[in-house]
Image (cartoon, rainbow, N blue to C red):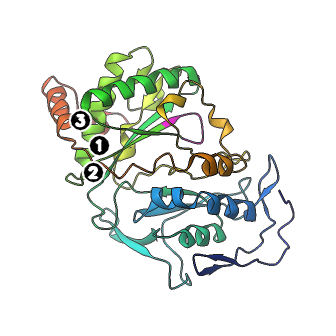
Amino acid sequence: MAAGRGNTPAVELDVGGCAVRPSSPDRVYFAARGETKLDLARYYLSVGDGIVRALRERPCMMHRFPDGTGGEKVHQKRVPRGAPPWLETVRVHFPRYGRHADELCVTKLADVIWAVQMSTVEFHPWNSRRADTERPDEWRIDLDPMPECDFARVRRVAHVAREVLDELGVVGWPKTSGGRGLHVYVRITPDWGFGDVRRAALAFAREVERRAPDDVTTTWWRRDRDPRTLFVDYNQNARDHTIASAYSVRGVPEATVSAPITWDEIDNVDPRDFTIATMPGRFAERGDLHAGIDDTAYSLQPLLEWAERDERDGAPGPADIEADSPG
C-alpha cells in the first residue's frame, strides 16, 4: 500500500453516482504498515454493504484524525457547512445543554466515503434510528476487559452471555471491538426509551455476573473493579453513548477493524487479525456476517422483569448507582 506525505492531488471516486474527492490521498494514516487515507477509503468501499447496514439511518458521531491516527482525534457530532447536497443528516437534541446537532445519517456508501474525505476513521452510531431517535432498536452488550483481563476470559464470558441469550430466546450478533473486547448486538422492538434499555442491559449483565462471578464485574466505578475481570458495560446503552460500529476501523496504528464474527469463531479468533488489509478478502469470501441482523426484533420485557426483581431485592438501578457513587 502506498505511503507518502500528503502532497498528491485529490483523486475522484465515483461512489454510486456521487463524486467524492479524498484530498491528500497519500497521507499516512496508520503508521504500522504505512496505510494511507486512500487505503482507508478503499477499505470502506470493499465492505460497503456491511458498513452501510451497520450505520443505516442512525445518528452517527465521526471520530476524525486530520493528521492520521498518530495525531489529534476530533469527536465531531455536527456535519459541517459545505457538505454535498446528497448527504443526509438527522437532528438530535441535547436538552441538558439546550442544543441540537445535525449529525451524519448514512443511507448510502457515498456518505461513508465523504466522511473519510473529512478524515473520519471511526464511525460511532447511536443505537436508535432517525424515525425516532428517542426509541432504540438496538441493545448493545459490551464485554470490556479490564487491564489485566486476558482474551481467554473474554471468550469465556462471551459463551456465558450467549447461554443467557439462548435462554431468553434471543439471537445476538457478535463482533470484535477492534481492541481487546467483544460486542454483541441484539435488535429490539423500538418500544422503550434509553432508560429502560439501560435497565434491561444492567439486568442482563447481573445475570452474566451471577453465572461467572470470578470473571465478570458490574461494578460501576472503574477504580473499584478487580483489574483481572471483565466489565459488562451496560451504560453503552445510555442516550448519546456510542461505540464503534461493525466494520468501523479503529484509530490505532495497526488499522484494526471491529469485525463481525460467528459464535463458532469465538474460541479461535484473535482480534488483531482483522485489519483494513485482511478484511476485504474476508468480506469477499464470506460476505456480511451480520446480514440477517434486521430480520427479527426482540422484546425487552423479560429483561425488564428481571430488573424489577433485582430492584425489589435491593439492587440499585443504573441512575441510582451513579447518584449514590462518589464522584
Q: Between label 3 and label 2, give the one nearer the viewer.
A: 2
142 to the left or right of 153: left
Q: Position of residue 27 (x, y in %)?
A: 80, 64
Compared to residue 261, the image places residue 132 above or below, namely below
Compared to residue 203, the image places residue 209 above or below, namely above
* Residue 50 visible (yes or no): yes
- The residue that label 1 is drawn on is 198
Between the C-alphas of marks 3 and 1, the distance is: 9 Å
160 to the left or right of 283: left
Q: Between label 3 and label 1, give the one nearer the viewer.
A: 1
Q: Residues within 10 Å of mark 1 (few under 14, many from 20)?
A: many
Between the C-alphas of marks 2 and 1, the distance is: 6 Å
- Asked if residue 151 lies in the magenta stretch, the reply is no
- The residue that label 3 is drawn on is 317
Q: Earlier in the sequence, mark 3 or mark 1?
A: 1
> Magenta segment range?
177-182
* Residue 224 visible (yes or no): no
Q: Amino acid at mark 3?
A: Gly
Compared to residue 215, the image places residue 96 above or below, namely below
Label ID, residue 194: 2
User: As rendered, which of 258 and 227 lies closer to the eye?
Assistant: 258
